[in-house]
Each structure stands twice: as C-alpha cells, then as structure tokens.
Image (cartoon, coloured by chain):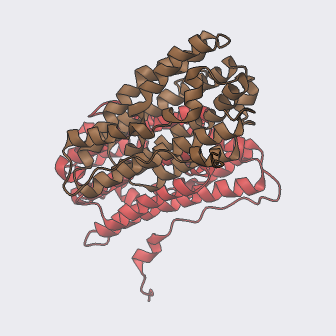
Chain colours: A brown, B red
Amino acid sequence: MMPPTLIASSLAAAPRPLFPPLERPLGPDELEQALRAFQGSYYVEHPFHRLMYEGGLTQRQFQGWAANRLAYQRVVPRKDGAILSNCPESDVRREWIQRIIDHDGTESGTGGIEMWIRLGVALGVPREEMEDERHVLPAVRLICESYVTFCRTKPWQEAVASSLTELFAPKIHNQRIESYPKHYPWIPPEALDYFRSRLVQAPKDVTHGLRLVKRWATTPERQRKVFEALAFKLEMLWAMIDTIHNAYRQDDGS
Amino acid sequence: MMPPTLIASSLAAAPRPLFPPLERPLGPDELEQALRAFQGSYYVEHPFHRLMYEGGLTQRQFQGWAANRLAYQRVVPRKDGAILSNCPESDVRREWIQRIIDHDGTESGTGGIEMWIRLGVALGVPREEMEDERHVLPAVRLICESYVTFCRTKPWQEAVASSLTELFAPKIHNQRIESYPKHYPWIPPEALDYFRSRLVQAPKDVTHGLRLVKRWATTPERQRKVFEALAFKLEMLWAMIDTIHNAYRQDDGS
C-alpha cells in the first residue's frame, strides 16, 4: 500500500540548484555556464506550468494566474528603480533604465504592465478586476515585495544577478506561444502579445546583466553571492507559482 | 565693545522656514503659495552664494565648490531611482523617469552629470580629479547620501515634495548665467551650459512635482509632511554649501 503523501509540500520547494565548487574563481565563461545550469530550478518546471503547456488548465486557473502574476509585473519597475538607486555608475544606469521604460511604456496604454493587463482581459478577467488587484493573493503580494526588498538591500551587482532568471525566460515564452493556440482555442491570439514582446526585450536584458555580473564576480566570494542571488530569485518565482497553483487547484488535485 | 562672534556657527543653519498654521487644510493654490514662501531658506541666500554672485570667490573656491557639488549631481539619479522604487503608479514613474535620463543622459558624454564635470573642467579642475571625487569632503558625501536615504525611506509623495527646491532653482541659475561673465572673465562661456540646460528642464520637473504634491496633500497631516520634506531638503542644500564654504574659506574669512 502506498503511504499517504502530502502533495502540497512536495511542490512547495524548487529543485535546489547545484552550486559549483568555488575553491578557485571560475573564469567568465565557466561562471556563465554554471549560472545557466540553474535552469532546472526555473519555475517552468513547476507542475502548474506543465499543466499549462499540456492543455490541462481550466479557464478559471488561467484567469487566477494572470490576475495574480500582474503583481509581479508591477513590482518589476520598482525593483529596477531600487537597482538604479543603489548603483553609482551612470553608464550602468543609462542602460538599466530601459527595463523600466519597457515595463511602464512611454505613454499611457503602452508597456509590459499594460500588455499583461490585456493578457488578463483576453483570458476573460475584466480590466477593472485586473487593475484593482482584487484577485491578488496576499501571499503573492508578499512574495513579489520580497523581490523589491532584495534589490533594495543587497549590493546592486547581486540584484543584477537576481535578474538573470531571464536567461531561462525565452523557453517559457516560446512554450506559451506554441501551446496556447494548440490546447486552448478559447484564448484569443492577442493574449500572446506580451510573450512575443519579451522574446525581443529579454535577450538584450540578459546580455547586459551577464556582462555586469561577469565583470564584477571575479572572486569566489562574489561568485557565491551571484549564485545565491539567482537561487533566491528562482525560489521566489517558484513560491509565487506554487501559491497560485494551490489557490486555484482543481477538484482532482491538478 | 562688540562681543566675539562665532562666524561658522552663525552660518551653519538655514533660516528656518515658516510653516503655515494647518488647523484646516490649505487649498491647492494656498499650498503652492506656502511652499513658494520657503524661498527665503533656499541656499541661494547662503553667504557663499552671495560671494559668488558679487564676484568675491577665488578660483580655488570655485574649484572646490564645483568638485564637491558633483557629489550632489551624482546622487540625484539615485534618489530618483528610490522614488521609482517606492512608487506603485506607472503613470507617475513614466514621467518621473525623465529626471534620471536628464542627469545620466542617453549616451556616454551626455546628461547633467557630464555637464557638471565639464563645468569643473572649465573652472580648471582636471577631469580625472572631478571623476574620482578626490576633492569631495566626507561631510559633503554624507550630506548628499542623506538625501538618497530620505527618498528611500519616506513615502514617495514626501520624496517628491523634497524635490520642490526646484521651485527656487531658476533664480540661482539665472544669477550664475548673469554674474559669471561679469565678475569672472577667466571663466569660459561653456561653464554656463549646465545652468542653461536646467532652465529648460527644471520648469517641467516643477510642474510635475507640484501637480503630484497638490493631488496627494489634501489634509493638514499630509500638508505638514510636505512642508517638512521641503524643509529637510532646504536644510540639506544649506548644510552642503556651508560645509563647502568652511572648507575653502579665504584668509579674510570670506
């Protein structure tokens, strides 16, 4: 007989990424490879995302996800503001600021946050209910705020390293662009606009972030900080999707 | 016989601005007028600035001033990043971000910080000595950092209110544009570029800042916070110029 299992707790933690031995400093390319090897802890591997790409989500689950994930979209420019606030280098700020512009847009009705709201609307959440965040779980709000706090309180180079989950983002965006039309005929095509835009923006962000991290993290001590920063962010994303999954779980447990 | 006077301490404090009675909330226009009435505490009134506009500064004093004031230029985008980080409103951030772009520029060799460095170079400070901040007094550094801390730790609306010293800035910029060619023939004309650029940028900033403050500060409690924020910033600027003055004082005490 199978022992009883606690399904929730088995999902609650991200697979722990493997830190490389740091008895000597890694070279820049080794550092990048070791960071990329954290991919297995990215929340694309979470059961909720697997359900999503296999066609197993209900419309209610999709809606709950989009409404909650907006809280994350909305903290992104704030954590980027915190990085600017901690960074004394004009050259770095001048490039980093583009992330805020990408998310807030250049005028009302543009930018990543607005595109995410439109995703929610496309999935059937009224715009008003997206904007007033009535569906955002308090736990999700706190999880997102922890990202702002991290970027406020850590050296800016570590905050930059935490942004490197973008290394793994193209996979998640491509999976959405491919799987939604296949499995969810009720989702209108404009729901994919946000993901398409990120496929253009994210590689620029990754190139800049990697360049800064490789320039700074030349000692084992700094490299450990970089791995810890990326591990924190992976855990934060995992905690967010896990919380959403548990809140909108179907009767059969999926 | 005149009693002995402690000159330094008589300069150390800014004239205390007069807070209006707040038994009832001020209307938006009253609020603006009461904020504008803080002008008498602006550091344009400090003896060092009076000396500057009367032609009484030596080149050494000018150089010490420009090299130290760069520390302030350099914290401005950081305090604006802190405001973005605390502000949950995309519409506000989208406009506020322009201040960071104004200071950091859109490419290397542009922006307000670079223009301030050129001012120092025009006054005879080698670029290298401007950039590495070797002349920046530790007290000036701490004073400037207090502004970032204020904007990090206070509600963003109060941080916005602290920026309203810009209300009084056109006077200071015009005084420089007028007095330098008159009193200091050794100063090349390009030294005025920064001040000319601020005459264009500052009014936009003031309009936005005032709009946000008037929208938010509708109760006596909030209005008191707004006055306190502006008083803090006036004191900070005064402390900075006073520290610079004392450090570069001439033998005759001026």
Furthest-front residue in this view: A1
Quadrant position of the N terminus of chain B in the picture: bottom left
Residue B174: image x %, image y %? 42, 41
* Residue closest to the eye, B184 or B115: B115
Quadrant position of the C terminus of chain B in the picture: bottom left
Residue A215: image x %, image y %? 24, 44
* Residue closest to the eye, B125 or A226: A226
Vertical relation: A189 (above or below) B216: above
* Residue closest to the eye, A110 or A217: A217
Vertical relation: A199 (above or below) A157: above
Furthest-right residue in this view: B24
Residue B173: image x %, image y %? 42, 43
Residue ID at (50%, 69%)? B13
Residue ID at (32%, 34%)? A208
Q: Number of callouts in the render?
A: 0
Q: Is residue A163 left or right of residue B95?
A: left
* Residue closest to the eye, B57 or B156: B156
Residue A127: image x %, image y %? 72, 24
Residue ID at (46%, 54%)? B44
On the question of residue B142 being in view, the answer is yes
On the question of residue B81 being in view, the answer is no
